[in-house]
Image: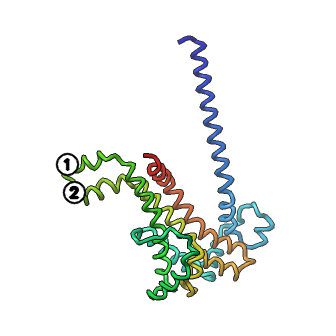
Amino acid sequence: MTKPATAQLRAFGHLNRTVSCLKSAAWLLLALVFLYPLLWMALSSFKSSNVEIFGHPFALPHQISFVNYQKAIRQGNMGSYFINSLWVTGLSGLALFFIGMILPVQSYLIPLIGLLETLGIHDSLWALILPYTAQNLPVAILLFTAFFASLPIELEEAAKLDGVGTGRFYFAILLPVARPAVATIVVVTCLNTWNEFLMALLFLVDPGMKTLPVGMIAFEQAHNTDYPALLAGLSLISVPTLLVYAMFNRQVIRGVIAGAVK
């Protein structure tokens, strides 16, 4: 290879590395733009008063104090709401074998309330768990169907030749292979359930049964001028979902891509 050609290849490689670095920097900047409001909210929740927030809105807290979180948990009952949301989200994300209907939630709210009262579970956490699982079932079926359809038929044929039964084939081979799809379904279901507001507002009357989004409204009405405490409550709602997505975002992307491309 001649010296000019070698120089051109080196220049091309250097250009590719430069472009790659610029892309990474641009993505990092974009991530910071989206993450900064969340970081500001979390840091401001540790400030001692409204004076500190409005006087120095972008400064770090003078001292780290959990008084606002104690206020949100004790006075706003956010701890109880957190547990309620955890139960509803967890059970709705795991129990994916109930019949679901692909309809707007507003179209069946009234008959659903009557059904819940007939079953005797109105104003209980089960009044949310069962409808949430039914709502998320179509998405789970769609993703699982697309994912399993993308697997080669030779996988099942080889298992049969080795004498592997249906149950063992499912639990020992299919489920480990389908971990990205499972992670996608669990994360999407949990995020949708954790943030749902309308049914939680209509189906739960007992103040002790409220989930975090509904409980936050009541807490905001009682502390509408106590901004550090309000930011602490918002952090309790936002941070868990962000952590779940940060932990499983690669599996979610793999599951969506694997189910979309055959």
Residue situated furthest right in the rendering? 55
Pick the front one: 211 or 46: 211
Residue at position x 79%, y 71% in the image: 51
Residues at marks 2 and 1, CA–CA distance in whole angstroms? 9 Å
Q: Residues within 10 Å of mark 1 (few under 14, many from 20)?
A: few
Pick the front one: 113 or 46: 113
Quarter location, residue 68: bottom right
Quarter location, residue 75: bottom right
**In the rendered view, would you say 36 is above or below 229?**
above
**In the rendered view, would you say 206 is above or below 196?**
below
Type of residue at label 1?
Asp
Pick the front one: 13 or 181: 181
Residue 161 is situated, as x and y percent measured from the top left of the image, at 20, 47
Residue at position x 46%, y 46% in the image: 261
Residue at position x 59%, y 80% in the image: 201
Residue 85 is situated, as x and y percent measured from the top left of the image, at 52, 74
Quarter location, residue 63: bottom right
Type of residue at label 2?
Gly
Residue 81 is situated, as x and y percent measured from the top left of the image, at 56, 78
Label 1: element kind: loop
In the picture provided, is 81 more to the left or to the right than 143? right
Q: Are marks 2 and 1 in contact (CB under 8 Å)?
A: no
Residue 47: image tag: none
Label 2: element kind: loop
Residue at label 1? 162
Residue situated furthest top in the rendering? 2
Residue 116 is situated, as x and y percent measured from the top left of the image, at 48, 84
Q: Residues within 10 Å of mark 2 (few under 14, many from 20)?
A: few
Residue at position x 53%, y 57% in the image: 246
Residue at label 2? 165
